[in-house]
Each structure stands twice: as C-alpha cells, then as structure tokens.
Amino acid sequence: MMWAEEEFADLDLGDARLNRRLMRLAETFARQPQASIPSACGGWAETKGAYRFFGAGSVGWQDILQPHWDCTRTRMSEHPVVLCLQDTTELDFNGQKIAGLGRLSYEAQRGMYLHPTYAVTPDREPLGVIDAWMWARPEVGAPAPVESTRWIEGYARVAEQASALPQSRLVYVADREGDMLELMQYAQTLGHPADWLLRARHDRKLPGGGKLWATVTTGEPLGSIRFTQPARPGQPAREVRQSVYARRVTLAGGITVTCVVARERQAPPGIKPLEWRLLSNRDGVDFASAIELIDWYRVRWEIELLFHLVKNACRIEALQLSTVPRLERAIALYLVVAWRIARLMRLGRTCPELPAELFFEPDEWKGAHVLLKKKVPGSPPTLNTVIRLIATLGGFLGRKRDGEPGVKTLWIGLQRVTDFATGLRYARESGERLTCG
C-alpha cells in the first residue's frame, strides 16, 4: 500500500472520484514537491483533474486534512508526552492574480497567513498536523477578526485532543506571541487539560511588587547547561553556556506560573547573549524540571522546519491558483506532504534500525540502490540506510563530519527515487499487458 492510501484511508469527500483524485495528488506531489502542478502531473488530463479538484466548492480544506488528523491522533496515543507546537508564517503571493489575498507585514505585499498546530514527540519525531488557521487580512479600515484569538483557539483544540487521549500528556508550546494572560486564564478555567509552555515576551509587574524576570533571577542559579548553537546567517556555530533559574510566581489575575530563565554567561564579544524566558503551568521548580521545559521549548524549532518544507520544498508561494479557497485546499494537502518528508528525516535519525519497507515501496528502496549502482540486497534494508542513499541522490556527501542528511537533500533525492520507481512500475505493467496480449 502506498503511503497516501494509508494516510487517507478514511477519507470521505462525498464522492469516490474525489477520494481517488486526492490520493493520487498526494502521491504525485510527494514525488515532486518542488514541481509546479502541471509539471508534477505530467500531462494535461492529470493537470486538469488537479485544478478541478482544487476548484471543487463542495470540498473544504478541513475535509482534506480530516483523515490526517485522525491518523495523527492515533500516533499521538502511542506516546506519553506530545508537544503541540504553534506558530504563524506569512505566505507571500505578491504579483499573482489571486482573488481574496490581503496585506501582509507591508501594505504593498499581498498574501495570506498560515497558523498550524504541529504535534511532535520530545525526541522530535513529527506525528502530524492537528489543527490550522488560514486567513487573509482585509483592507485597512474594513472589519477584521481579532488575530490573537488564534492562540487561544489553538489551545482549545489541543485541550479537545487531550480529552480523547487520556494516556498522553499534551503540551501546548508557543513563541512570544502566545504570551497572553487571556490564554493562561482560559487554560486555568478549563482545569489545564493540556499543559502549556510559552516563551515570555512581557516583563510583567508582580502583584506583590517587583518585576517578573528580576524576581526569578534573584539568588543563585539552580545549575548550568551547555550546548552548541547551530550556525546562523553571519554567525558560525558556537558553544553556549547558560545559568538556569526557576521560580513559581503569581501574576495579575491570580494566575500562578513557573517561570524559567536560562541566561547565557560569557558570550563572545559582539554577540548578544542568548537568553530564554519561559512560562508554564507545570509546577516543578527543581533543576531537572527546568531543564525539561527548556528541552521541550527547543523542540519548537520543528515547526520552523515544517514552514521551510512547505515554502521551499513544496513551493506553495509559487502556486498559481485563482482564489484563496483553492489555495487553502492545496496548502492543506501540501502540509501532509511536508510532514511526511520531515518524518522520514527524523525517523532516519532517531529510529535508524526500523525496516525501510515500513515507509518505502520495494521499487523505491531498490531503485535507490540501482541509481547509485549499488548491489540490491535480498531483504529490505534499514530505514537509515535507505534515507542516506536517497539523500546521496540529492547531493548528500556522507562524510564523517556531515552527520545525518537534512531535509533538502532528502526531498531532492525523493524526486529521483519516486520517478525511477514509477518508471519501473510502468515498465512492469506494460510487459504484463504485452504478455497477456
């Protein structure tokens, strides 16, 4: 069974033809995520079918994601802790004639916003997308919804998931934009069915006097941590040492939180010291509990990786669709494609000994060997072996200092492998037809 048939097994769009079309499109776009719709479809009939599907007014983008949501919930149920990451990204369609676009950060930019909830494990295994907001801003002066509501409604969706997953502890994780007293009060009103972890933006005044961050960092730190900060534009990778502080404090409105501050010591000259300030409903204030919250927050980078895949691997900002509803249907499908690429990469690192046949068809893992002129093994190799072969086809060199493959070499290699596998299947089916004839 192909991966899309499994992920969309419970799909019900009210028409069996639409169901089949969606599964074909998922497989097609996963094979060539960077290609335009006509290029990926490879012919006018399939291209016309794709555009008709995205123009189907009877299909909502939520309908497309529903079976993926259901599969994600099943995967979540297998883990004691699941981190539910939230963030927003701009989708810039400037210059394209798409009805319904709105302004972005700058008035001249035209586009829309995407705000998903992404479920991952503390070990960074991507489980899937469990919620999404998509919207375009109206013109200046026109009535507009309160955009900050998405953070509170995002927590509400996570809380609903928590009630259906009593054996799993869900943790809502958000960046500075999610630092809202209203969100904390809402979670408290519900009885914290899901934990929450926010990066603090506001140095609030405390009811008993003093400011939040100074109060928390008074006295000796609980301990220190050390890690390597990855390279960034203009900055090489560097070692970071932080002192860790934690304290339970009461904010305005009687909201009691744990505040953790990780403050860098001895940053290099000219480099702004790295400091994290986190808020959570969890009540542990010892060193181990503080480190756990810091580790969970660092996993938030996975949603940035999802955005990278959606924008650069799937190139959704290059989609030429005529209306926002059509874009939303395409984005919903590409979210699932991006999740699958991220999941393959992470499992290749964290679960390298899994059999490759769990994720790849025989023609695919055999094709990776053939394309690299390597002997095809008699039995399915490990997932990590196949991931590295596929990434090699995408430019991964595999030197000792290179570590494990990243998503870019993986998505490029996947295109070559899946094209080769498609050719093998076509040749085999053609041979069978000729034999029967």
Image (cartoon, rainbow, N blue to C red):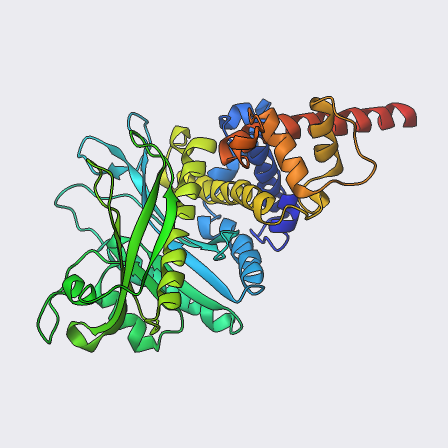
Q: Position of residue 422 (x, y in %)?
A: 70, 29
Q: Position of residue 67 (x, y in %)?
A: 56, 54
Looking at the image, residue 326 sits to the left or right of residue 272; the answer is: right
Q: Is residue 437 above or below residue 351?
A: above
Q: Residue furthest right?
A: 436
Quarter of the image containing the C terminus? top right
Frontmost residue, 215 versus 203: 215
Residue at position x 20%, y 66% in the image: 216
Residue at position x 49%, y 28% in the image: 34
Q: Judge whether residue 129 can be spotted in this image.
A: yes
What is the quadrant of residue 419 in the picture? top right
Frontmost residue, 357 versus 31: 357
Frontmost residue, 79 versus 47: 79
Looking at the image, residue 201 sits to the left or right of residue 378; the answer is: left
Q: Position of residue 376 (x, y in %)?
A: 79, 30
Q: Residue furthest left?
A: 209
Q: Is residue 192 above or below residue 385?
A: below
Q: Judge whether residue 415 can be spotted in this image.
A: no
Residue at position x 22%, y 67% in the image: 182
Q: Is residue 408 above or below residue 196?
A: above
What is the quadrant of residue 197 in the picture? bottom left
Q: Position of residue 161 (x, y in %)?
A: 46, 66
Looking at the image, residue 83 sits to the left or right of residue 94; the answer is: right
Quarter of the image containing the N terminus? top right
Looking at the image, residue 355 sits to the left or right of residue 202; the answer is: right
Frontmost residue, 59 versus 145: 145
Q: How many marks?
A: 0
